[in-house]
Amino acid sequence: MRLRKWIIMGACLLGACALANVGCGARGTAPVEDRSQGGAEGALGLEFDYEVNPADFSLTLYVDGQSLPAAGASDERRTEQVKTEEDGVSWRYPEEKIRVAVKPEEDYLSVQIGAETEEDQAFRWPEISAGLYYIPLGEGKRVVSDQAEWKMFLDGQELAVNEALSMPFWASVYGDYAVLFIMENPYRTSLNFSAGPEVSFGVEHRYPAISPNRTNRYRIYVTENDPVAVAKVYRRYVRETGEFVTLEEKAGDNPAVQNLFGAPHIYLHGDLAVTPEDINWPGFRQAMDTPAMRHIMSFLDQSEVGAEAKTVFAELGKQDYVAEYQKYAICSYLTEVIKRGDFYAPEVFPERNDEMRAVLDGQGERSPYRQIRLNQNALAVNMPDVFHPTDTWLEKETTGLLEEMKEAGIEQAWIGLNSWEQAYVKPELARQAEKQGYLLGAYDSYHSIHEPGKEQWITAEFSDSSLYDDAVVVDADGEPVKGFKNVGRKLNPTLSLPAVKRRMGEIMGTGLPFSSWFVDCDAFGEIYDDYSPEHITTQEQDLAARMERLAYIRDTYGLVVGSEGGNDFAASTVAFAHGIELKSFSWMDEDMNQNRDSEYYMGKYYNSKGGVPEHFSRRVPVKEPYRTVFMDPRYDMPLFKLVYNDSVITSYHWDWSTFKVKGATGDRMVREVLYNVPPLYHLDRAEWNRYGEDIARHHKVWSKFSKRAVTREMTEFAYLSGDGAVQMTGYGEDLKAVANFGDETWQYGDKKIPGHSVLIQGEGIELVYTPEVGEENR
């Protein structure tokens, strides 16, 4: 690459302004353009001149005689110590106690903003206004400034960069060029949007007194108006930082990563420890007055479902049958009982099998896994006329379902469990997944911690009860930050690792062959400054601790690790992420989130039969502006894939599985090919019966394509139609996909692509794929 020294074109635009401290302009020129394509290392910005006015901090760039208003004018501030030299310009805002330095580098303009004091400070810059933006909201969006739905959605929004953006940059488009801002230190930075009359935003930086990091740095590039050029400059920047790790490199450290290639992501639901099929119900009724049954019923007053179960037990004494709802009420209660540490009583359950003897003769404290297995066997061994043998329990919903998936052609899959207890109650599930070459992992979280004894979900329960008072995040007002859904508190990640080690040690100590792990929130970007005097923690430390625990789980147990979100600060650590392709947004709207009478309501987090909760199984339409912003493929842009396709496998937030949105399934399947996105499903027996054929048909095409695309850099992307409904992606040198999301047939070379279809070309493949989806599943 040739370099060119920056040249200052003029010391001051306003005459003797440097002396008067009312503002000064400086101009420079960037290096010679290098338009090499393909590799990230060759993706350079274009040559440009710049002009900056310290008084209002406006910044204008010039390319081939065209002016690009990179940063609009802010309110004028008094300046001092304005220095214009060959290597840039610097100045100070005395009232704000802020220092600024603007310096040309190899092919970008460096802007550094630093807070001088150790007090709480804030500063806003730049002010951005353009007709079109490329913003990595999730996978990436092209935001049209005068588009009604974007205006409606963004007006008044304050988006934290580390949370809302999958990568810390944006590009503003001006004619043939794009101005790219990369934020090198995105902590405590937000984009504050307004839409009057068009979408614009300002960038707010906070510098809390507890943070020693009091400098923000931008790299500002000019590229052609091309999202590929924008993304490749950022990819080069990530490689420069040393934080880019390919999937092939990750697979070199853990070969099980390869089991993700071409694999759909499936949450397998099942909250019951025993199902109606595992019980002889006539025998159950006949045993109602036995000592064992009385022991079972002795926990009714301590059970969350005890009131309903007590009613059902009373009804069974007056009936000669057991209704379906009664069976599930009993099974829900038995599930609670089976998980109790105080359930087993040797005088009630005197008979033992080998597994029971192994538990009872073992040394030390009984683990939850061993206790569950003891309780299950105690019932089956001592009440053989009521309970079938434990190795047949849950078979239809677990091992049987996995076998049917394999028979349907799903050779590889990622299987996620609601909780590790699903494997505790059915250890054969983990062994069957291992046998079939499926990755099996459990949902886990260290984000929220609940008051000891009042835990509402298992991941918020920790054996060290002191954590609730001594290890939680405290805000600037001295109040503990509330946990998810305002329940409990947020656990400080820097104090969590001992709890992580204890939990993971207990789970992996069972010997169950888990091969993957999913940790909620850690790659999402919801990070904190903790003001507790006992453990002051900055956002930087918070995030580093999250990555440390992900790496600990990955490296200690050889697990394929993923997380919610998947923002790029986690890209070198995780192998997969849920949320980049479609973020969670139902919380933004009352109809989706709370109004149970609305057609848009997502559904309850409960299934009386222990399977997929309504929240995941109920199919819903999506209202505006959310449909346009989150679901309309015409505004999609694969910015994240252009940077990280060969580094991280990304899918949807679990709220938005492939079949969740009414009327969108076919287009989402097309997009899964185009952008190389694993389908995501929520399955139990009923959902597999409903969707299995559609899943198998789609898998035959998607998986074959994805296995070829997944380890390659996404090298190409283009909108082929003006409205964005026809798009093309390229992977490596010769693998392409052309998707038509419109209704009319699109002519691509000598190929006709029907509406809502995708053409796959390369490596001896040439196929036009139109997803076939059952009428009720479209």
Image (spheres, rainbow, N blue to C red):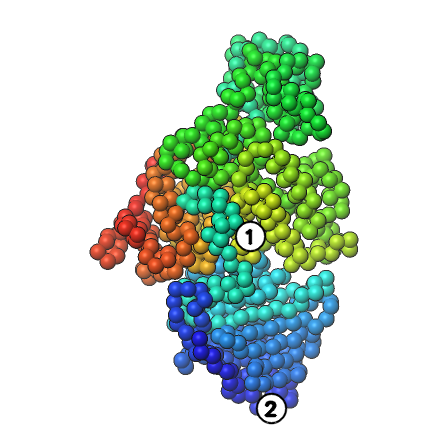
SS type, badge 2: loop
- Give the x, y percent position of residue 298: 68, 18
Q: Amino acid at mark 1?
A: Thr
- Residue where numbered disc 1 is placed: 573
Quadrant assignment for the C terminus: top left
The residue lying at 34 percent from left, 44 percent from top is 701
Quadrant assignment for the N terminus: bottom left
- Residue where numbered disc 2 is placed: 16
- Give the x, y percent position of residue 607: 53, 31
Query: What's the distance in space between the residues labelled 2 and 1, CA to CA?
Result: 53 Å
Residue 289 in which image quadrant: top right
Quick one: 283 or 417, which is closer to the camera?
417
Q: Is residue 585 left or right of residue 702?
A: right
The residue lying at 53 percent from left, 46 percent from top is 562
Quick one: 133 or 353, which is closer to the camera?
353
Residue 308 in which image quadrant: top right
- Give the x, y percent position of residue 619: 44, 39
SS type, badge 1: loop
User: Which residue is the extreme one toward the right?
Assistant: 534
Q: Residues within 10 Å of mark 2 (few under 14, many from 20)?
A: few
Residue 376 in which image quadrant: top right
- Give the x, y percent position of residue 256: 49, 43
Q: Does residue 199 show up?
A: no
